[in-house]
Amino acid sequence: MSHQNEQRRNFVKKSALLGLAGMAMPHLGFSANEAQLEKENISYVLERPKVIFFDVNETLLDLNAMRESVGNALGKRNDLLSLWFTTMLQYSLVDTVARQYHDFGIVGVATLQMVASNNKIKLTKEQATEAILKPLRSLPAHPEVRSSLENLKKAGYKIVSFTNSSNLGVKTQFENSGLIDLFEERLSVEDIGKFKPHSDAYDWAARKMGVQPKECLLVAAHGWDIAGALWANWRAAFISRPGAQLYPLAPTPEFNESNLKLIADKLIALT
């Protein structure tokens, strides 16, 4: 096969995975029939990742209880919830670029106080802590999560959690949600002191598991996390939970589904 033909076929294989198969691509010399054929053969082309890394909050665990608690702390101003989350993410990255580190929960408490103060809502540190940490520790898994993880393990996948939360925090969450037995390893950015989506965090996680970046696949329900993984040369699968969006300026992940079961089914089908 010539280099040009190989490039064309690799492009179509990728396009098939992204749901573009069946479209004619005259600029590459491919007809719609050829593109459809590549789609049908895609499972024979793509390799399984050696390790599947899972983000935790919202990806695996349902945040509704925490949203309600934080909303109540903000005077039932549900319009401020997304502002609080983006402010928390912003200041976790401020920590990282300034070579500082605070527990993600502590950043969450501090930024909840900031949002409350900016909106003239009285909220003490103790009240902010209670609003975030108590529900966060006991979040339930999304309905399809446990069976999907079990199926991935049965299919021979190595599955690892990878979170911005602390080591103790994610251990408590998994104990309370009944997921702790399913992961071969629990990784927290606490051990490197840099939050995702910093590329160093993904590089560290790959080294920790003894694999190359291209052998890693991140499953996450956050566009910023997917973008960070892809820019660190990982593969990625996006769970489009309600309100979640991909970052348009980042590369497109291989998988984009509404729940973990649909992603797990596609991963299990890979050879």
Image (cartoon, rainbow, N blue to C red):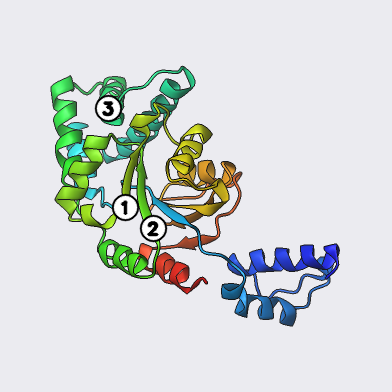
CB of mark 1 within 8 Å of CB of mark 3?
no
Instruction: Classify 10 Å Cα crowding around label 3: few (below 14), some (14-19), many (20 and above).
Output: many
Q: CA distance from mark 1 to mark 3?
A: 33 Å
Q: Residue at x 75, y 74 (%)?
A: 24
Q: How packed is label 1: few (under 14 Cα within 10 Å), some, or many (20 or more)?
A: few
Q: Mark 1: which secondary structure?
A: loop
Q: Position of residue 241 (x, y in %)?
A: 38, 56
Q: Which mark is residue 184?
A: 1
In this view of the protein, which residue sits in the foreground, 111 or 115? 111
* Amino acid type, callout 2: Lys
Quadrant housing the N terminus:
bottom right
Mark seen at residue 112: 3
Secondary structure under the numbered disc 3 in the rendered image: helix
Question: Which residue does the image show at 27% across and 27% down from the upper left?
Answer: 112
Label 2 Cα neighbours within 10 Å, binned few <14 / some 14-19 / many ≥20: some
Of labels 1 and 3, earlier in sequence is 3
Q: Amino acid at mark 1?
A: Glu
User: Taking the image as drawn, is residue 160 in sight?
Assistant: yes
Label 2 secondary element: strand
Q: Earlier in the sequence, mark 2 or mark 1?
A: 2
Of circles 2 and 3, which is in front?
A: 2
Q: Position of residue 184 (x, y in %)?
A: 31, 52
Give the answer, above or below, for where 268 lies relative to 238. Answer: below
Circle number at residue 158: 2
Above or below: residue 255 compared with residue 99: below
45 or 81: nearer the eye? 45
Which comes before the other along the chain, label 2 or label 3? 3
Which label sits in the foreground, 1 or 3?
1
Residue at image position (17%, 37%) is: 72
Name the amino acid type tagged 3: Leu
Distance in Å between CA atoms under marks 2 and 1: 7 Å
Q: CA distance from mark 2 to mark 3?
A: 36 Å
